[in-house]
Image (cartoon, rainbow, N blue to C red):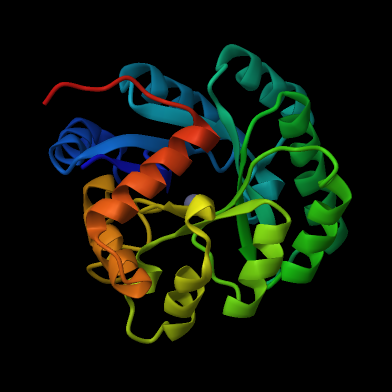
């Protein structure tokens, strides 16, 4: 069994010093590829270094909606130069978030659209964070739909009813260990509804730990999410692993096979 972790933040200061151990545990747990998403302009350098050091890490560069204020004027050309230097890189984590205490809605949408346009220009997939901004997200994607590119909605938290519409727009939906929470029946209903060709799984390490809020997550925990997804979709963990591995490689590309 080979597993594909479609969204993690290995550059996070809470885990970066432990990365050798974390990546060897991931390998022992059959995690073959990990997409490492940047969040701010300042962490893109770390993301690119991690992808050089660990050959099964696919880098992604983007401005996360929580940290837009940390960008500087040259962010667009910096993003372009990271994509040029990292030919396998995706764009992410980018997105829209209406749950923040204060935010400039117009600016958030404008920066999101700008990053989508750059991704399209370089024909790279995007990893999207969306919280309570589904109408705005769909409005942006509908405008861009005539240009084929891969959009991954990470840690999907929308209503089960929205799944069909997002799939129709060509989105991939990625699920995290939030599907395992007994309070989150919605996520289970959503994952059951996604066509196999649009399904991805992720840890979002070091966040969304399956062992509770005060623990740190890591890619080795992906198998728990695979097992949860298999229960909701009434199939075997092996089926889930192979479908999400294939989808992950289709969207983000292949990484070299590491010997155990
Ligand atoms: Zn994330």
Q: How many callouts does the rendering have?
A: 0
Image location of residue 99, percent across then percent down: 65, 73
Image location of residue 143, percent across then percent down: 88, 50
Q: Judge left or right: residue 64 versus residue 116.
A: left
Residue at image point 45% right, 34% down: 249
Residue at image point 65% right, 14% down: 84
Q: Judge left or right: residue 180 versus residue 44.
A: left
Residue at image point 19% right, 40% down: 30
Q: Please, which residue is most extreme toward the top here?
A: 85
Position of the C terminus by quadrant: top left
Figure check: 59 above or below 233: above
Q: Quadrant of residue 23?
A: top left
In front of the other: 177 or 198: 198
The answer to whether residue 100 is visible is: no
In front of the other: 193 or 36: 193
Q: Judge left or right: residue 105 versus residue 194.
A: right
Position of the N terminus by quadrant: top left
In front of the other: 255 or 24: 255
Q: In which quarter of the image is residue 231?
A: bottom left
In front of the other: 203 or 194: 194
The answer to whether residue 156 is visible is: yes
Image location of residue 206, percent across then percent down: 34, 52
Figure check: 77 above or below 128: above
Image location of residue 55, percent across then percent down: 33, 20
Q: Judge left or right: residue 207 versus residue 114.
A: left
């Amino acid at each position: 069994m080979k597993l594909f972790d479609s969204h993690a933040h290995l550059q996070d200061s809470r885990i970066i010093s432990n990365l050798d151990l974390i990546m060897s545990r991931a390998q022992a747990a059959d995690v073959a590829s990990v997409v490492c998403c940047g969040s701010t302009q300042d962490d893109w350098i770390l993301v690119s270094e991690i992808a050089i050091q660990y050959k099964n890490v696919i880098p992604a560069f983007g401005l996360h909606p929580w940290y837009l204020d940390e960008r500087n004027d040259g962010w667009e050309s910096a993003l372009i130069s990271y994509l040029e230097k990292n030919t396998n890189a995706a764009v992410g984590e980018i997105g829209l978030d209406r749950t923040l205490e204060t935010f400039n809605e117009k600016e958030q949408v404008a920066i999101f659209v700008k990053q989508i346009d750059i991704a399209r220009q370089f024909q790279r997939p995007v990893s999207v964070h969306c919280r309570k901004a589904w109408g705005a997200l769909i409005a942006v994607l509908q405008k861009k739909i005539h240009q084929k590119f891969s959009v991954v909605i990470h840690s999907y938290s929308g209503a089960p009813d929205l799944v069909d519409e997002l799939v129709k727009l060509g989105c991939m939906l990625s699920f995290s260990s939030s599907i395992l929470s007994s309070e989150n029946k919605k996520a289970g209903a959503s994952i059951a509804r996604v066509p196999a060709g649009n399904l991805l799984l992720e840890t979002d390490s070091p966040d969304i730990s399956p062992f509770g809020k005060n623990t740190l997550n890591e890619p080795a925990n992906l198998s728990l999410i695979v097992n949860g997804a298999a229960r909701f979709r009434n199939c075997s963990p092996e089926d889930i692993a192979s479908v999400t591995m294939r989808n992950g490689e289709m969207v983000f590309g292949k990484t070299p096979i590491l010997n155990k």
